[in-house]
Image: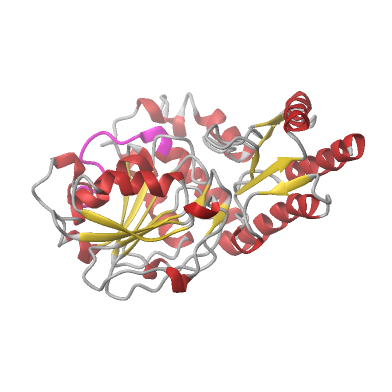
Amino acid sequence: MNLTNQRAYNFNAGPSALPLEVLEKAQQEIVNFQGAGMSIMEMSHRSANYEEVHNSAIARLRKLFSIPENYEVLFLQGGASLQFTMVPMNFLSEGQKASYVLTGSWSEKALKEAKLFGTPVEAASTKENKYRNIPALSEIGFNADDAYVHVTSNNTIYGTQWKEFPETGDVPLVADMSSDILSRPVDVSKFGIIYAGAQKNLGPSGVTVVIIRKDLLEKANTNIPTMLKYTTHADSNSLYNTPPTFGIYMLGEVLRWVEEKGGLEAIEKQNVEKAKVIYDVIDNSNGFFTGHATEDSRSLMNITFRVADEELEKQFLAEAKAAGFVGLNGHRSVGGCRASTYNAVPFEACQALANFMLDFQRKHQ
């Protein structure tokens, strides 16, 4: 436990840690937002006060992520899971193919949804290797007439992350960036669509960001329900219906926090340093701790590992919880341990975990 402010060391995979400064500002404004006599949650989404919050969040995201002018920025709901459906519903016709690169459970789910609308195919997969790595770019196969190529940039369950992305030419590259968006600079112009649930690096759960190239909107299927059309939301500045106003307010404040930290270059540097202190303990433990991901595919956001044996692992997790470390259990589908070190997780939390791991090893080796 961080005794300075009585906050837990939060390594939850999502919803995850939010910057303390953002939470404190929200606390101050929760009852009376900017002198309006009401909370942002109570305001009309058509009001001038909320409109400023909404448009400022979009502008900040454009600036921080260097989003070109020929892209729309949308605030939707339903999480990345709804995007698994919306992407093929809008862009994959019956009989048409799309290529999916399988690197974990979430890409599997995206592929499953796409099968309802067209003929998706596996462009590459590392499932046989228990999703320990990202496939080499040379292993990825797709066709020039594919509707799109889909990747998951970071895999929370298995702890792997793409270090570079495939060049797909005229075939739109679609990326689920839910768990590493804004953790590093990315060339947005390489992608046709980027989507991300907010609850890892962007804010609280309830908001989904979609960044979509405008020319794709002109090609989207129109014979689908209104709320599932990207054009519906693009044409109305994401205000077709009531948006998740508080979530968007929080997202905007998180973006402000990233700006104050020095932008994505500074955030990436800090993320590398945070992950290194934990990976170094794993690598130097002589097998007491073993990482799941291969070194060339390791995630900076989700560090997955096992302890020497099952009973020791249970003891490690129990003692860590008692010591104030939250969220270190691996995903229920794979077990083990996982430290999620998203942007808002401070370096001191990662150092404290590294020290706890070293101490646990000394006691039990």
The image quadrant that residue 85 belongs to is top left
Q: Along the line of sight, which residue is nearer the eye, 365 or 85?
A: 365
Q: Along the line of sight, which residue is nearer the eye, 265 or 145?
A: 145
Q: Which residues are magenta?
A: 234-247
Quadrant, the N terminus: top right
Residue at 42 percent across and 45 percent down: it is 106
User: Where in the figure is residue 251, as x and y percent of width and height?
Assistant: 46, 43
User: Where in the figure is residue 159, as x and y percent of width and height?
Assistant: 58, 49
Q: Is residue 240 magenta?
A: yes
The image quadrant that residue 42 belongs to is top left
Residue lying furthest front in this view? Answer: 128
Q: Along the line of sight, which residue is nearer the eye, 331 or 321?
A: 331
Quadrant, the C terminus: top right
Using the rendered image of the protein, determine whether residue 255 is visible from the camera's viewpoint: yes
Q: Along the line of sight, which residue is nearer the eye, 252 or 330?
A: 330
- The majority secondary structure of the magenta stretch comes to loop
Image position of 230 (left or right of 247): left
Image position of 252 (left or right of 214): right
